[in-house]
Amino acid sequence: MTPVISIVADEEEAGSVIARRIADDIEADPQCAIGVATGSSPLPIYRYLAVLVDRGLSIGGVDWFALDEYLGLADGHPESYRSILLRDLARPLSIAPAKLHLPDPFTDDPDAAAGDYEHEVSDARVRAQIVGIGRNGHLGFNEPGTPLDSPTHRARLTESTRAANARFFDSIDDVPQWCITQGLGTIMRAARIELIATGEVKADAVARALYGPVSPDCPASVLQTHPQVYVTLDAGAASALPQQKIAAS
Ligand code: F6R
Protein backbone atom coordinates (compact mmCIF):
# COMPACT_ATOMS: atom_id res chain seq x y z
CA MET A 1 0.00 0.00 0.00
CA THR A 2 1.16 3.55 -0.64
CA PRO A 3 2.74 5.13 2.41
CA VAL A 4 1.01 8.14 3.93
CA ILE A 5 3.50 11.00 3.52
CA SER A 6 3.36 14.17 5.62
CA ILE A 7 5.67 17.08 5.04
CA VAL A 8 5.93 19.21 8.15
CA ALA A 9 7.67 22.46 9.07
CA ASP A 10 10.52 21.07 11.14
CA GLU A 11 11.73 18.17 13.24
CA GLU A 12 9.78 19.26 16.32
CA GLU A 13 6.52 19.12 14.36
CA ALA A 14 7.53 15.75 12.93
CA GLY A 15 8.09 14.54 16.48
CA SER A 16 4.76 15.80 17.75
CA VAL A 17 2.78 14.34 14.82
CA ILE A 18 4.25 10.88 15.39
CA ALA A 19 4.14 11.07 19.20
CA ARG A 20 0.41 11.83 19.04
CA ARG A 21 -0.21 8.70 16.95
CA ILE A 22 1.88 6.64 19.40
CA ALA A 23 -0.15 8.11 22.26
CA ASP A 24 -3.32 6.97 20.45
CA ASP A 25 -1.83 3.45 20.22
CA ILE A 26 -1.13 3.46 23.95
CA GLU A 27 -4.56 4.78 24.84
CA ALA A 28 -6.16 2.07 22.68
CA ASP A 29 -3.99 -0.66 24.22
CA PRO A 30 -2.14 0.37 27.40
CA GLN A 31 -0.16 -2.92 27.39
CA CYS A 32 1.09 -2.55 23.81
CA ALA A 33 4.61 -2.86 22.45
CA ILE A 34 6.23 0.07 20.68
CA GLY A 35 9.40 -0.27 18.61
CA VAL A 36 11.94 2.49 19.06
CA ALA A 37 15.01 3.61 17.14
CA THR A 38 18.15 5.43 18.21
CA GLY A 39 20.10 8.05 16.24
CA SER A 40 19.14 11.71 15.98
CA SER A 41 15.93 11.45 13.95
CA PRO A 42 13.53 10.05 16.59
CA LEU A 43 14.62 12.35 19.43
CA PRO A 44 11.83 14.92 18.78
CA ILE A 45 9.30 12.06 19.09
CA TYR A 46 10.63 11.18 22.52
CA ARG A 47 10.65 14.84 23.54
CA TYR A 48 6.99 15.22 22.61
CA LEU A 49 6.03 11.91 24.24
CA ALA A 50 7.54 13.32 27.44
CA VAL A 51 5.23 16.33 27.07
CA LEU A 52 2.23 14.02 26.64
CA VAL A 53 3.27 12.00 29.70
CA ASP A 54 3.49 15.25 31.68
CA ARG A 55 -0.05 15.98 30.51
CA GLY A 56 -1.26 12.66 31.89
CA LEU A 57 -0.60 9.98 29.24
CA SER A 58 -0.12 6.75 31.18
CA ILE A 59 2.62 4.55 29.70
CA GLY A 60 3.45 2.22 32.60
CA GLY A 61 2.14 -0.88 30.81
CA VAL A 62 4.00 -0.33 27.53
CA ASP A 63 7.00 -2.43 26.47
CA TRP A 64 9.57 -0.63 24.32
CA PHE A 65 11.68 -2.64 21.87
CA ALA A 66 14.89 -1.28 20.34
CA LEU A 67 15.77 -1.87 16.72
CA ASP A 68 19.38 -2.70 17.33
CA GLU A 69 22.40 -2.67 19.62
CA TYR A 70 26.12 -2.40 19.01
CA LEU A 71 28.44 -5.29 19.76
CA GLY A 72 31.82 -4.68 21.38
CA LEU A 73 31.14 -1.68 23.61
CA ALA A 74 31.79 -1.92 27.35
CA ASP A 75 28.77 -2.37 29.61
CA GLY A 76 27.39 1.11 30.36
CA HIS A 77 29.26 2.77 27.47
CA PRO A 78 27.44 6.10 26.93
CA GLU A 79 26.95 5.39 23.22
CA SER A 80 25.54 1.90 23.61
CA TYR A 81 21.94 1.91 22.47
CA ARG A 82 20.82 0.78 25.92
CA SER A 83 22.52 3.82 27.47
CA ILE A 84 21.06 6.12 24.82
CA LEU A 85 17.53 4.81 25.22
CA LEU A 86 17.80 5.01 29.00
CA ARG A 87 19.01 8.62 28.67
CA ASP A 88 16.72 9.89 25.91
CA LEU A 89 13.60 7.79 26.41
CA ALA A 90 13.33 5.85 29.66
CA ARG A 91 14.47 8.50 32.16
CA PRO A 92 12.57 11.49 30.72
CA LEU A 93 9.39 9.38 30.45
CA SER A 94 9.91 7.50 33.75
CA ILE A 95 9.90 4.13 31.95
CA ALA A 96 11.04 1.27 34.17
CA PRO A 97 14.31 -0.17 32.78
CA ALA A 98 12.66 -3.63 32.74
CA LYS A 99 10.20 -2.31 30.14
CA LEU A 100 13.04 -1.45 27.77
CA HIS A 101 14.15 -4.37 25.60
CA LEU A 102 17.30 -4.66 23.49
CA PRO A 103 19.36 -7.50 22.05
CA ASP A 104 21.92 -8.75 24.58
CA PRO A 105 25.37 -7.67 23.37
CA PHE A 106 27.30 -9.33 26.23
CA THR A 107 27.00 -12.95 25.32
CA ASP A 108 29.57 -15.35 23.92
CA ASP A 109 27.08 -16.23 21.21
CA PRO A 110 25.65 -13.13 19.50
CA ASP A 111 23.89 -15.28 16.90
CA ALA A 112 21.94 -17.02 19.68
CA ALA A 113 21.24 -13.62 21.27
CA ALA A 114 19.88 -12.43 17.93
CA GLY A 115 17.63 -15.51 17.75
CA ASP A 116 16.36 -14.86 21.28
CA TYR A 117 15.56 -11.24 20.44
CA GLU A 118 13.77 -12.28 17.27
CA HIS A 119 11.43 -14.41 19.41
CA GLU A 120 10.98 -11.66 21.98
CA VAL A 121 10.02 -9.07 19.35
CA SER A 122 7.76 -11.51 17.48
CA ASP A 123 5.93 -12.49 20.66
CA ALA A 124 5.43 -8.84 21.58
CA ARG A 125 3.50 -8.06 18.36
CA VAL A 126 4.80 -4.54 17.94
CA ARG A 127 1.96 -2.11 17.36
CA ALA A 128 4.05 0.74 15.95
CA GLN A 129 7.71 0.68 14.99
CA ILE A 130 9.60 3.98 14.77
CA VAL A 131 12.42 3.95 12.22
CA GLY A 132 14.95 6.44 10.91
CA ILE A 133 16.72 5.88 7.61
CA GLY A 134 20.42 5.76 6.83
CA ARG A 135 21.88 7.85 4.02
CA ASN A 136 22.50 4.58 2.19
CA GLY A 137 18.90 3.49 2.71
CA HIS A 138 19.56 1.26 5.69
CA LEU A 139 16.76 0.45 8.10
CA GLY A 140 17.85 -0.58 11.56
CA PHE A 141 21.36 -1.76 10.75
CA ASN A 142 20.18 -3.67 7.71
CA GLU A 143 22.76 -2.39 5.28
CA PRO A 144 22.43 -2.59 1.48
CA GLY A 145 22.47 -6.22 0.38
CA THR A 146 20.52 -7.52 3.38
CA PRO A 147 17.69 -9.89 2.32
CA LEU A 148 14.32 -8.18 2.59
CA ASP A 149 12.91 -11.00 4.74
CA SER A 150 15.87 -11.24 7.15
CA PRO A 151 15.23 -12.09 10.82
CA THR A 152 17.10 -10.45 13.70
CA HIS A 153 20.77 -11.12 13.07
CA ARG A 154 24.35 -10.13 13.74
CA ALA A 155 25.43 -7.62 11.12
CA ARG A 156 28.53 -5.73 10.08
CA LEU A 157 28.22 -1.96 9.76
CA THR A 158 29.36 -0.46 6.46
CA GLU A 159 32.15 2.09 6.52
CA SER A 160 29.68 4.80 5.45
CA THR A 161 27.45 4.04 8.45
CA ARG A 162 30.46 4.00 10.78
CA ALA A 163 31.51 7.36 9.34
CA ALA A 164 27.98 8.76 9.82
CA ASN A 165 27.95 7.54 13.46
CA ALA A 166 31.50 8.73 14.21
CA ARG A 167 29.96 12.02 15.39
CA PHE A 168 28.91 10.23 18.57
CA PHE A 169 32.41 8.86 19.31
CA ASP A 170 35.89 10.37 19.76
CA SER A 171 36.96 8.90 16.42
CA ILE A 172 35.69 6.56 13.73
CA ASP A 173 38.03 3.89 15.11
CA ASP A 174 35.87 3.76 18.22
CA VAL A 175 32.65 3.05 16.28
CA PRO A 176 31.84 -0.65 16.59
CA GLN A 177 32.11 -2.83 13.49
CA TRP A 178 29.30 -5.19 14.47
CA CYS A 179 25.82 -5.05 15.91
CA ILE A 180 22.69 -7.11 16.41
CA THR A 181 19.77 -5.68 14.47
CA GLN A 182 16.14 -6.55 13.97
CA GLY A 183 15.98 -7.88 10.42
CA LEU A 184 13.89 -6.36 7.68
CA GLY A 185 11.46 -9.25 8.06
CA THR A 186 11.22 -8.51 11.80
CA ILE A 187 10.57 -4.80 11.26
CA MET A 188 7.95 -5.60 8.63
CA ARG A 189 5.89 -7.57 11.16
CA ALA A 190 5.07 -4.42 13.14
CA ALA A 191 1.43 -3.49 12.59
CA ARG A 192 2.42 0.07 11.64
CA ILE A 193 5.72 1.66 10.73
CA GLU A 194 6.54 5.30 11.43
CA LEU A 195 9.46 6.58 9.36
CA ILE A 196 10.89 9.92 10.39
CA ALA A 197 13.53 11.71 8.31
CA THR A 198 14.70 15.29 8.45
CA GLY A 199 17.34 17.19 6.54
CA GLU A 200 18.41 17.25 2.92
CA VAL A 201 21.10 14.69 3.68
CA LYS A 202 18.30 12.08 3.78
CA ALA A 203 16.52 13.24 0.60
CA ASP A 204 18.04 10.74 -1.80
CA ALA A 205 17.55 7.76 0.55
CA VAL A 206 13.93 8.75 1.18
CA ALA A 207 13.18 9.06 -2.55
CA ARG A 208 14.80 5.70 -3.29
CA ALA A 209 12.99 4.04 -0.38
CA LEU A 210 9.56 5.31 -1.41
CA TYR A 211 9.74 5.34 -5.21
CA GLY A 212 12.77 3.31 -6.25
CA PRO A 213 12.76 -0.41 -7.01
CA VAL A 214 12.01 -2.68 -4.04
CA SER A 215 15.44 -4.20 -3.66
CA PRO A 216 18.08 -5.09 -1.06
CA ASP A 217 20.17 -2.32 -2.69
CA CYS A 218 17.96 0.08 -0.73
CA PRO A 219 16.77 -1.86 2.34
CA ALA A 220 14.15 0.75 3.29
CA SER A 221 12.43 0.16 -0.07
CA VAL A 222 10.88 -2.91 1.60
CA LEU A 223 8.50 -0.45 3.28
CA GLN A 224 6.68 -0.12 -0.05
CA THR A 225 5.31 -3.61 0.58
CA HIS A 226 4.03 -2.92 4.13
CA PRO A 227 0.29 -2.30 4.56
CA GLN A 228 0.57 0.67 6.96
CA VAL A 229 3.49 3.06 6.74
CA TYR A 230 3.47 6.71 7.80
CA VAL A 231 6.36 8.80 6.53
CA THR A 232 6.95 12.16 8.23
CA LEU A 233 9.49 14.45 6.55
CA ASP A 234 10.66 18.03 6.66
CA ALA A 235 11.14 19.92 3.41
CA GLY A 236 14.80 18.95 3.17
CA ALA A 237 14.16 15.21 3.47
CA ALA A 238 11.28 15.52 0.98
CA SER A 239 13.28 17.54 -1.53
CA ALA A 240 14.08 14.66 -3.90
CA LEU A 241 10.54 13.25 -4.03
CA PRO A 242 8.80 13.50 -7.39
CA GLN A 243 6.63 16.67 -7.29
CA GLN A 244 3.44 14.92 -8.48
CA LYS A 245 3.75 12.36 -5.65
CA ILE A 246 3.99 15.12 -3.04
CA ALA A 247 0.96 16.87 -4.48
CA ALA A 248 -0.99 13.58 -4.40
CA SER A 249 -0.01 12.59 -0.88
C1 F6R B 1 19.12 3.43 14.86
C2 F6R B 1 19.15 2.79 13.56
C3 F6R B 1 19.58 3.49 12.32
C4 F6R B 1 19.24 4.97 12.30
C5 F6R B 1 19.77 5.60 11.01
C6 F6R B 1 19.51 7.09 10.97
O1 F6R B 1 18.56 2.57 15.84
O2 F6R B 1 18.84 1.65 13.50
O3 F6R B 1 18.97 2.87 11.22
O4 F6R B 1 17.85 5.15 12.37
O5 F6R B 1 21.15 5.39 10.91
O6 F6R B 1 20.25 7.71 11.99
P1 F6R B 1 20.03 9.24 12.32
O7 F6R B 1 18.63 9.38 12.77
O8 F6R B 1 21.02 9.55 13.40
O9 F6R B 1 20.30 9.99 11.07
Image (tube, rainbow, N blue to C red):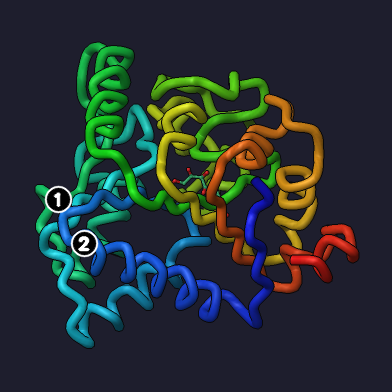
Asked if residue 53 is positioned above or below residue 70 in the image, the reply reads below
Can you tell me whether the CB of the residue at mark 1 lies under 8 Å from the nearest atom of ligand 1? no
> What secondary structure is marked by label 2?
helix
Depth check, mark 2 against mark 1: the one in front is 1
Q: Please state, as top left, top right, bottom left or bottom right, where the C terminus lies in the image.
A: bottom right
State the CA–CA distance, disc 2 to disc 1.
9 Å
> What secondary structure is marked by label 1?
helix
Can you tell me whether the CB of the residue at mark 2 lies under 8 Å from the nearest atom of ligand 1? no
Give the x, y percent position of residue 111: 32, 13
Q: Quadrant of residue 154?
A: top left
- Residue at 49 percent across and 75 percent down: it is 17
Asked if residue 91 is positioned above or below residue 108 in the image, the reply reads below
Q: Which residue is mark 2?
A: 90
| Mark before the other along the chain sequence, 2 or 1 | 2
Q: Which residue is mark 1?
A: 99
- Residue at 39 percent across and 52 percent down: it is 128
- Front-lying residue, 78 or 83: 83
Q: Are marks 2 and 1 in contact (CB under 8 Å)?
A: yes
Question: Disc 2 marks which amino acid?
Answer: Ala
Image check: 148 left or right of 86? right
Give the x, y percent position of residue 137: 67, 40
Question: Disc 1 marks which amino acid?
Answer: Lys
Disc 1 crowd rating (10 Å Cα; few below 14, some 14-19, many 20+) is: some
- Number of marks in the rendered image: 2
- Front-lying residue, 102 or 193: 193
Hey, which residue is sitting farthest bottom in the picture? 55
- Residue at 41 percent across and 68 percent down: it is 21
Asked if residue 169 is positioned above or below residue 225 in the image, the reply reads below
Asked if residue 160 shows in the view, the reply is: no
Image check: 203 left or right of 155? right
- Front-lying residue, 155 or 186: 186
- Residue at 29 percent across and 55 percent down: it is 85
